[in-house]
Image (cartoon, grey):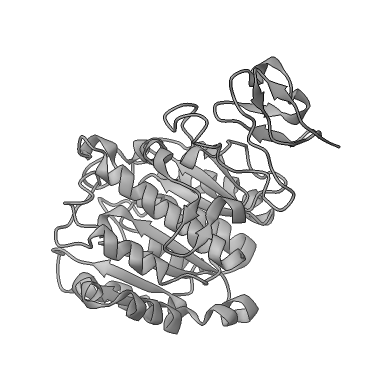
Amino acid sequence: MATGCTVAGVQASRAVATTHTTTLAANTFHSSDTCSHRLIGIRYIGMSADQPRFQPPDASVAPRYTGIRTFARLPQFPVPHDGVDAAVIGVPFDTATSFRPGARFGPEAIRSASALLRPYNPALDVDVFATLATVDGGDIAITPGNALRTTEQIDAALQPVLRAGIVPLVLGGDHSIVLGELRAQKAVHGPVALVLLDAHADTWDQYYGERYFHGTPFRRAVEEGLVDPSRSLLAGMRGPLYGPGDLDEPLELGFEVITGSELAALSPGEYGERVRSRIGSDDLIRREAGPVFLSFDIDVLDPAWAPGTGTPEVAGLEPRKALAFLRALAGIPFTGFDVVEVSPPYDSAGQVTALHGAAVAYELLTLLAVSRR
């Protein structure tokens, strides 16, 4: 039964008197508490019948810097959870890095920087959070210093989420975490097509004798049958290498590669065409071609825009073009995403890397919203 109430002189929106949990500007409460003392001074953010249950609170009621730091100020729930379309999930692991650590603090920094995000994305004309019931699913438990054990923990945590039909957006964390994500994707959806934007192909066999490292996950993924390299496209690779053979490794595994200089010369439309020519058309993917996963390493951006990362490489993308490349993929029905390698200890005072990480994550949710509307 729908009810309404006025608390402390503030008219509440009509609330559904069920046991559903509802998010306020600064609190989370159950709708049976609609007129309780918890609402004093805070306007209830109601839900209409045609909107998802889970949305950020109204920033015109309480400032964005209030409340617990979740991604885009979304309600936080453990997942899987009924009625959820997408979940933002942190993986604060960084002990598989080869140079600068700190990405364990990436999920926290991206969440904090995301407080300024708003629901409507004008670039793709979609209200992201009115289209998708989205929650912040918190962080996955990890084991510092043990990349293989952490991979297993990520896989175990994400499989139930995927089986519930929820699309995960994972915030890293170094890039080794993607192997656990891909294991879960394979278990639920089958081998995925990989769309990668990264300064590095991450297809080396080992680093310091370690086979589970942030420079090796996509070789392991091919070996384990988690990705279909014939339907995958890696883009943005640049910088000095150990030898000419490094250029051949991803190609020998079956990946198509667009180097950083090639990528910079493409228009967003041309990049979108290259991706679709590799993974299949949007309709074909829905019918038969198989799942698609997008991984975004923040070091694909130039260090001028993303200094806070583990292995920065000069001459990268500027953010405007990177976001345009992502928007060119609108319509592709992705089954998962991640944003990795944001390292706050090396970020600028203005937290520009975290800001860009949050913006990229928002665009990834936008891609999902466009594919669902």
Above or below, comparing residue 79 to residue 265 in the picture: above
Depth order, front residue of 366/229: 366
Q: Is residue 342 visible?
A: no
**Residue 58: x %, y % from top left:** 54, 37
208 horizontally vs 211: left or right: left
238 horizontally vs 205: left or right: left
Q: Residue at x 23, y 37 (%)?
A: 350
Depth order, front residue of 23/179: 23
**Residue 25: x %, y % from top left:** 55, 30
Q: Determine which quarter of the picture holds residue 283.
A: bottom right
Q: Is residue 333 visible?
A: yes
Q: Residue at x 20, y 46 (%)?
A: 307
Query: Quick one: which residue is furthest to the front in this view?
Result: 9
Give the mark count: 0
Depth order, front residue of 73/37: 37
User: In the rendered view of the protein, which quadrant contains the C terminus?
Assistant: bottom right
Query: Quick one: which residue is furthest to the bottom in this view?
Result: 277
Q: Residue at x 42, y 38 (%)?
A: 115
Above or below, comparing residue 80 to residue 11 in the picture: below
Q: Determine which quarter of the picture holds residue 370.
A: bottom right
User: In the rendered view of the protein, which quadrant contains the N terminus?
Assistant: top right
Q: Residue at x 24, y 43 (%)?
A: 308
77 horizontally vs 230: left or right: right
Query: Quick one: which residue is furthest to the right in this view?
Result: 1
**Residue 261: x %, y % from top left:** 18, 73
**Residue 199: x %, y % from top left:** 25, 62
Depth order, front residue of 26/75: 26
164 horizontally vs 283: left or right: right
